[in-house]
Image: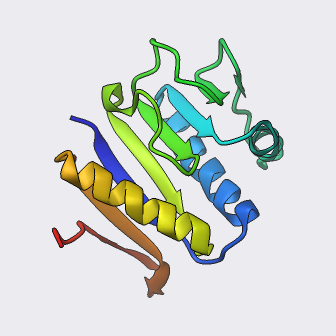
Amino acid sequence: MTRIDFYLIAGASNDERLKFATKLIGKAFDAANTIYVHCESSQLKQQLSDLIWQMPNRFIPHGDVTESVHLGLEAPKDDFHDVYINLSAGIPPNYSRFNRLIEIIDQSEDRLIAGRERFKAYQQKGYPLNKHDLRDKHEGRVVSSAPSSS
């Protein structure tokens, strides 16, 4: 069953959310995972691509078709199954065939509301959910916990 991780980040800008996504992409790429990033628009997809190319001391090949990091607007390719990063407001297509789904929630009101709705939908379907609250750091550690069932 797909493991679903919600990352709650400080700030409300799309740039912060995309920069955090590049960090997760880098970690997943280093672990030799196939990665699909579901973008809500062509503009967001281009912004993310630009940020990936600008990562210091890194080369992460990415694109639409043949790379192990795929940025897309539609359902992911059949041969992708490791990590799915959702950067759209809705529940992404075909997420259930992935080992892991990542949701990045910043503090913009619209994204908070949409994130809560997705959290409830996944919870109702019985998926294991993990919450990583990066808004509150203690002594350099990230506070991470499994969500309550309320």
> Would residue 114 appear left or right of 66 to someone viewing this image?
left
Q: Which percent across, then down, holds residue 117?
A: 39, 60
Judge whether 2 appears above or below 82 on screen. Answer: below
Q: Which percent across, then down, holds residue 144?
A: 33, 70
Which residue appears farthest toward the bottom when viewing the image? 139
Judge whether 84 appears above or below 108 on screen. Answer: above
Which quadrant, please, contains the N terminus?
A: top left
User: Which residue appears at 27% of the width and 37% of the height?
Assistant: 2
Q: Nearer the viewer, residue 112 or 2?
A: 112
Q: How was the colour assigned to the protein in this rendering?
A: rainbow
Q: Which percent across, then down, holds residue 132?
A: 39, 67
User: Which residue appears at 18% of the width and 73% of the height?
Assistant: 150
Q: Which percent across, then down, holds residue 38?
A: 58, 36
Task: Tell me if I can see residue 106 in this picture.
Answer: no
Judge whether 147 appears above or below 25 on screen. Answer: below
User: Which residue appears at 53% of the width and 23% of the height?
Assistant: 75
Judge whether 97 appears above or below 103 on screen. Answer: above
